[in-house]
Image: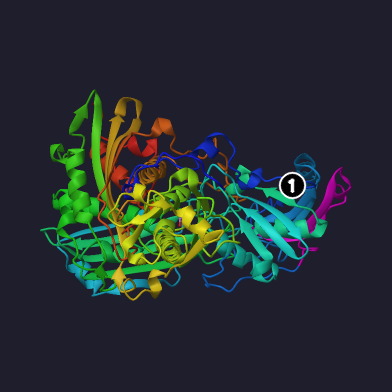
Amino acid sequence: MAMGMDAAGGLGKDIIGAAVSRIDGPLKTTGTAHYTADFHFASMAHAVPVQSTIASGRIKRIDLSVAEKMPGVLLVLHYGNMDRLYRVVPNDFSATTSEARPPFEDERIYHWGQFVALVVGETLEQATAAARAVTVEYETKAASLKPSLSDYQGKRKSVSKRGEVDKAFSNAAVKIDQNYITPVETHNPIEMHATVAQWEGDKVTLYETSQGVWNHRLAMAQVLGLPRENVQVITKFLGSGFGGKLFPWPHSALAAVAARRIQRPVKLSLSRKMMFTNVGHRPRCEQQIKIGATAEGKLVALRQDYLNHTSFIDDIDEGCGEATPYLYSVPNLEVTSALVQRNTGTPSPMRGPGAVPGLFAMESAMDELAIALKIDPVELRLRNEPVKDEGTGQEFSSRHLKECLETGKQKFGWEKRTAAVGSMRRDGKILGWGMAAASWGAYRFGASATVELCADGRVCVRSATQDVGTGTYTVLAQVMHEKTGVPFDRIDVIIGDTNLPEGAMSGGSWATASALPAISGAAANAIKTLMQMAVSTSGSAFLDKDPATLELSQGRVHVSGQSPSTGIPFEDVVKLARLSGITGEGKTIPTSDDPKAKDLSLHSYAAQFVEVEWEPEIARLRVSRVVTVVDVGRIINLKAATNQILGAVVMGIGMGLLEQTNYEQRTGQPINGNMADYLMATCADSPRIDVTFLNHPDLALNEYGARGVGEIGLAGVAPAITAAVYHATGVRVRQIPVRIEDLLKSDVREA
Ligand code: MOS
C-alpha cells in the first residue's frame, strides 16, 4: 500500500538511526488501517466457538437439536463431523503450530475453554445465540489444576553444565539458596486473535493475526492437507502479539474448514475471554537458585533448577535457563528443567520467553547475594563479567553489559544510594532503589526481498514479513530512503502477504535484523541494474560511462562526487530503457548457516535501575522512576526503538506488581479472564522512564549492526523492582506479583 508522508524527505543517509515517525501512523490514527477483523466480504458468515465447561475428560454427547434450528444457523462443526485435519512434524521449525493437536481431533478435553464445537451463522448475533444453545454432555475426569509445581518428583533434564557445581556450592564462603515463583501471565494485545477465511476453488486466503505469515501458510497447508501454493496468508496490520501470535492456533483451521463447508467467507474473532484460554500464556515457573561466592564476591557456583507447567497436549519448555550460562563468569554451573502437566491451554512464548522469568530468579538471587556479601549490587555484577560465553565457549559478537551498568549507575544517581533498608526518604515517602542486569538472545532468520525502481518514480520493497505494530513498515522505508534518497511519499512498503518473497517472522525481536540484509541487498542489486541501463541505453546522458562512477542520491542518478542536481531522476533512466521497472532481489542467510556468525555468542544486554516509593501508612507502593540502558546494536529508528523499550518497561511493572492469571480450582476456568480483573500496568502506573541506547553496532548480524529491539526492555525489570522493594521495606518478595499482603510484613513503619 502507498504510505504518504515525506517527513524524511531530505535526511538521506542520516535517516538510519533518526527518530522517524511511523509511515503507517496516519492510517492507524484515522482508523483506515485494516486489521484482520476489519476485513468484510459479501456473503461473509460469522463463526462462534463453543467452549468446554470442564477441564478434563471427554465429550459424551453433543446435542445440536436446538442450535441447528435457530435462525441464521448455517453449520455446526464438532469432532463428530469435522473435516480431516493433519498435524505438523514435531519440532520442525519450518512449519510450526502452537498446539500439536488440530481442533476437534477427538472427543477428549484437556482444559476449560477448549473449543468443542463451532457455530456458523449469518450474523455474529445469530451465531452467538446458537453457540449458547449447544449442549454438551461430558464424562469428567479429575483435573490437575494445582498452581504449585513443587511436589514434582520426576526426572530433570540437564540444560547446561560445567564444572562441579554441587561441590563448589557446598565449599563456597557465601551462599544463597532460594526459590522464586513467576505466575501464569496472559498476553493481552489490544487486537484480539481473528481469522477471516475465504476459498476460491481449492485455494484458501486466510486474513490472520499472525506474527509470521510465512510460517502460518506452511503450517496451515500442512494442517489442511493442501499444497502450500493453495494457501495465502495476509496480515496487513497487527495490534501486537507479544509472542501469542507467532504460530497458528486452532481457530485458524476452524475458520478455514467452516468457510470450505459453506462455500462462503467466514470470520472467526476470539473474545477477550477466549484470549485467556485458547491462545497461549506464559506458564508458571518455579525456580530454585543456588549461588555460591567467595567473600570477595567472585561467583564459584550457580545452579538453577526450574519447573514450568505445560498442557496435556504439548510439551512447552519455558527455557528459564536462556540467560544463565553466559551472563556471568562462574566456573561451576548447572541448569536443569522439567515440565509439569496441568489442565490449562498450551503455553506459548511471551515477551522474552525463558529469559524473562529466568532472570527474575537469577537477578533476585544476585541481589540477595550482594546483600549477604555487603557488596554494592552493581559492583557484584561488574566483578563477575565474563570474557567469553562460558556456556558455549564462544566469543561474544558485541557485549557491553559493563557499559550498561556503568551508564545506568551514573544516569540514575546510584552513588547517592545508602544501602540500609528503609534508609532513603523523599517528600514523606520511603524510597527503594534496586537494579538488575539483563540479556536476550540475538538471531537472524533467513529472509528474502525484492526492491523495484519503477518507471513512475516509486520505489517498492516487498517481503512476506509483517509489522506487529513495532515499526517494520517504517524501518523498511528508512532503508529504501537511505539507499535511493527517494522521499517517503514515493516509497511503497509491501509486506504482510505470502504472495511476496519469503520474509522473516516477527519473533524474538529479530525481524529488523533479519530483513535488513535482504532489503539492502535487493536495493543494491536494483541500483546496479539501473546504472547498467544508464550507461548502455542509447540517448542516456551517461552513455558509455563506467557504471562504477555513478551514484543514486536524492532519487537521481548522477556522477559520484557531483551534486545530484547535475544528474537525472532515476525514473527517466527506467523510462528511456522502455522498462516498467527494475527489480533487484536480496537474501538474508540465517545466522545459524553463516560461518561468520554461527560460532559467536549473539545477545543483547541491558541494565535496569528502578526507584519505588513506599508509603507504609496506606500500604501504597509505586514505581516512581526507571532508568534503562540497552545494548542492542545500532538503532535504526530511535523513536520506534524507544517506544519499544518504554512499552516493555511498563510491561515489566505489570509483571512485578500486577499480572497473574488465576485458574478456578474446580473447573479450571480463569477467574480473572477479562480486562477488568486481569491487572496490567496502565499510564497511571507508569513512572518517568529514561531510555538510553549504547548504539554499538553488532556487525555479526548485518551491515548496519542492528540486533533488534523489544524484548530486552522487559528483561530484568521485575527483579529490579523486587530489589527496590526490599531496599524500601526489608521484605524480599520471591513470588511475583508483589502483593500488599507481602509489604504489610515490613518493619519499616513510617516515612
Ligand atoms: Mo516474541 S515472545 O518472539 O513475540
Q: Is residue 377 visible?
A: no
Given residues 188 and 513, the one toward you in this image is 513
Q: Secondary structure at mark 1?
A: loop
Which residue, as the protein is rendered here, is positioned at the far top? Answer: 427
* Residue at the (54%, 38%) spot, across then down: 28
User: Which quadrant holds residue 681?
Assistant: top left
Quarter of the image where the C terminus is located: top left
Which residue, as the protein is rendered here, is positioned at the far left? Answer: 296
* Residue at the (21%, 39%) spot, across then down: 412
Q: Is residue 238 visible?
A: yes
User: Which quadrant holds residue 250?
Assistant: bottom right
| Residue 731 as seen in the image, left or right of residue 9 | left
Amino acid identity at mark 1: Phe
Disc 1 crowd rating (10 Å Cα; few below 14, some 14-19, many 20+) is few
Which residue, as the protein is rendered here, is positioned at the far front? Answer: 539
| Residue 172 as seen in the image, left or right of residue 361 | left
Where residue 462 appears, as percent x and y from the top left, is 52, 58
Is the C-beta of the residue carrying label 1 under 8 Å from the nearest atom of ligand 1?
A: no
Q: Which residue is mark 1?
A: 41
* Residue at the (59%, 38%) spot, across then down: 32
- The number of numbered discs placed on residues in the rendered structure image is 1
* Colour scheme in use: rainbow
- Magenta range is 56-83
Given residues 228 and 660, the one toward you in this image is 228
Where residue 613 appears, as percent x and y from the top left, is 29, 32
The answer to if 442 sits in the magenta stretch is: no
Where residue 726 appears, as percent x and y from the top left, is 26, 41
Q: Is residue 157 above or below residue 566?
A: below
